[in-house]
Amino acid sequence: MFNPTYFPRQRWTYPKEHERNLVASFFHAVSITLLSTSLVHMVWFRINGGANCTQYIMLNQFFTLGYFETRSGRIRYSGDVISSPVTNIYHSSAEVLSCITPQVVFLIRTVILLCLAAICSSVIGFCLDLIGPKRKLLRIIRQNALPSIITVLLIVAVLGLCYLVSTALQSAAYEAHVNEAASVQVAYEFGYYTITIAGAVSVLATACNLLQSTSPPEEIQRHRLIEDLDGIETFSVGMRNMPEPPPPYTP
């Protein structure tokens, strides 16, 4: 028997399924998870050898506004002043961080903004690959993998800024440990490597979109016409199978 909901649903099913890319959406979901985890829960930098410096630096320590305090001291040897170390202390709402300069705060907050932008672009790519839009502009954006490309570029910018952050932390630690500068080192931690993996996963999402085979518009139109004809034939068959009406009443 003819189902009145069959024809319109069948008409729009093909182009929607054709535009989906579930593999790319999976890679986008993994990238979103890695970016969010590294942004909130992981250590990004470790200061080794600085007794007066905060050892572990995380991005969530700079989510709120704070203020700076500068402490300077003098080290005397045989009655002569040989050094004057300066320690920059950053007071946030969560904790007190040592060896943090305004330059470090500016760079880390820039990293946070770029990570949030990368998460947004990955979410857009995930939605486009999962839904499979039929609009021409959205289809072009998805097929050319623009959201995942933007995510990769943002992550590359974050990695470059991390190098500047490590250099700024090294300088701040040098000011706080004048006589021990050779033993103070800044190393990358799990957050840095996690976002690097997120960039590699975004590259895989880009490859999935760029390598996906796409049918020309003529083929899509041909499938739509075939589906329309199938719906019309189903409707006509259903009408033929209906019982004939009874003859008119005659007294």
Image (spheres, rainbow, N blue to C red):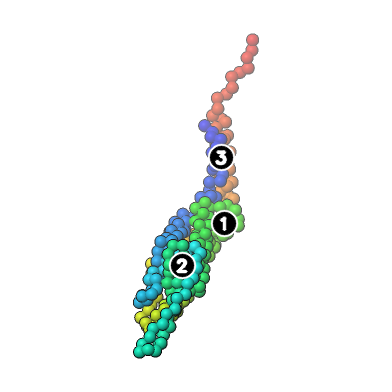
Check disc 3 and report its element: helix, strand or loop: helix
Q: CA distance from mark 2 to mark 3?
A: 65 Å
Check disc 1 and report its element: helix, strand or loop: helix
Q: Which mark is residue 7?
A: 3
Give percent across and percent down for residue 187.
Answer: 39, 74
Point out the tag, 1 or 2, that comes first from the N-terminus: 2
Q: If the image is split into quadrants, where does the C terminus sit?
A: top right
Q: Amino acid at mark 1?
A: Arg
Give percent across and percent down for residue 127.
Answer: 51, 54
Q: Is residue 205 above or below residue 77?
A: above
> In this figure, which residue is indicated by the disc labeled 1?
139
Q: Is residue 180 left or right of residue 92?
A: left
Question: Within 10 angstroms of label 2, few (less than 14), some, or many (20 or more) residues?
Answer: some
Give percent across and percent down for residue 16.
Answer: 53, 50
* Disc 1 versus disc 2: nearer the observer: 2
Q: Is residue 138 above or below residue 75?
A: above
Q: Does residue 244 appear anywhere in the picture? A: yes
Q: Residue at x 43, y 69 (%)?
A: 97
Q: Residue at x 57, y 56 (%)?
A: 139
Q: Amino acid at mark 2?
A: His
Point out the tag, 2 or 3, that comes first from the N-terminus: 3
Q: Nearer the viewer, residue 225 or 5?
A: 5
> In this figure, which residue is indicated by the disc labeled 2?
91
Check disc 2 and report its element: helix, strand or loop: strand
Q: CA distance from mark 1 to mark 2?
A: 48 Å
Q: Amino acid at mark 3?
A: Phe
Residues at circles 3 and 1 in contact by the CB criterion of under 8 Å: no
